[in-house]
Image (cartoon, coloured by chain):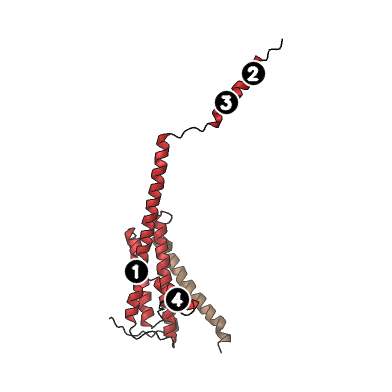
Chain colours: A brown, B red
Amino acid sequence: MMAMVPLHLSHFQSLLLFAVIISLAFGTLGRRDPLERLKYAAWSFAMFVLVAIALGWLMYPVSR
Amino acid sequence: MFDDTTGNKTAADAVSVASAENIEPAAPVHEVQPAKAHSARTGAYDLRAIAIAIAGWILPGFGHALLRMWGRAVTVFLAVGFLVYLGAGMRGNLFAPGGEDAFARLGYAADLGTGSFYFIARNLEPSGADVSHADGDYGTRFLATAGVLNLLAALHAYEAARRRKA
């Protein structure tokens, strides 16, 4: 049985990791041309991060 | 007195033409056989596409590897693998079969989307899930996302095998 060290990431680190992995997968699956893939991945990454931060601030008044 | 032969001839001609039009022309042999061959080929493509999709589901990226789409195969394998590794490392909840409510069953379906990685994730989490902290909650999402991403990749491989997408 494999054992692994538990990972402790902050909210923002988790968000960045999630956004990077999913954006790369989206870019590779969604486009054929390498440059188009890179553009699409960068766009997806930016949208993931910006929308998450915007939603976080939007929910901030009702969080306390 | 009245010559009606012209009219009779015309009527007879009309009947013969009409009967000739009612007969459907037989399709030439060389046109029938390619149609059958085409449908047989399409059926073979469908079976092949289904097999590729199942292979891609069982081992992430394998469906694309069978189609010689190496970049996509490696990306899907690494993306799903990393998400499962991170999710298990963060002690996310890996749902088991026979959940009590719809959310647990839906979570199990999403987790099972990772194919063979589901069983690897079970081995990576010897002490079980811990969703009392944010880490565990994020880990649960990572594991579910890995499954859904792999299902999306398997569907993409299926479409590519059917020549609908490249």
Instruction: Give a yes or no on whether discs 2 and 1 share a subunit.
Output: yes
Farthest right residue? B1
Quadrant housing residue B78:
bottom left
Q: State the residue position of label 1.
A: B77
Upstream in the sequence, badge 3 or badge 2? 2
Q: Secondary structure at mark 2?
A: helix
Upstream in the sequence, badge 4 or badge 3? 3
The span from disc 4 to disc 3 (Cα, nearest Å) is 70 Å
Q: Quadrant of the N terminus of chain A?
A: bottom left
The mark closer to the camera, 1 or 3, is 3
Q: Chain of mark 2?
A: B
Instruction: Give a yes or no on whether discs 4 and 1 share a subunit.
Output: yes
Q: Chain of mark 4?
A: B
Q: Residues within 10 Å of mark 2 (few under 14, many from 20)?
A: few
Q: Is residue B136 visible?
A: yes
Q: Residues within 10 Å of mark 1 (few under 14, many from 20)?
A: some
Q: Residue at x 34, y 79 (%)?
A: B122
Looking at the rendered structure, the kind of residue marked 4 is: Gly
Farthest bottom residue? A64
Q: Position of residue B31 (x, y in %)?
A: 42, 37
Residue B17's mark?
Answer: 3
Q: Secondary structure at mark 4?
A: helix
The span from disc 1 to disc 3 (Cα, nearest Å) is 68 Å
Q: State the residue position of label 4.
A: B107
Q: Is residue B5 above or below residue B24?
A: above
Looking at the rendered structure, the kind of residue marked 2 is: Asn
Q: Quadrant of the C terminus of chain A?
A: bottom right
The span from disc 3 to disc 2 (Cα, nearest Å) is 14 Å
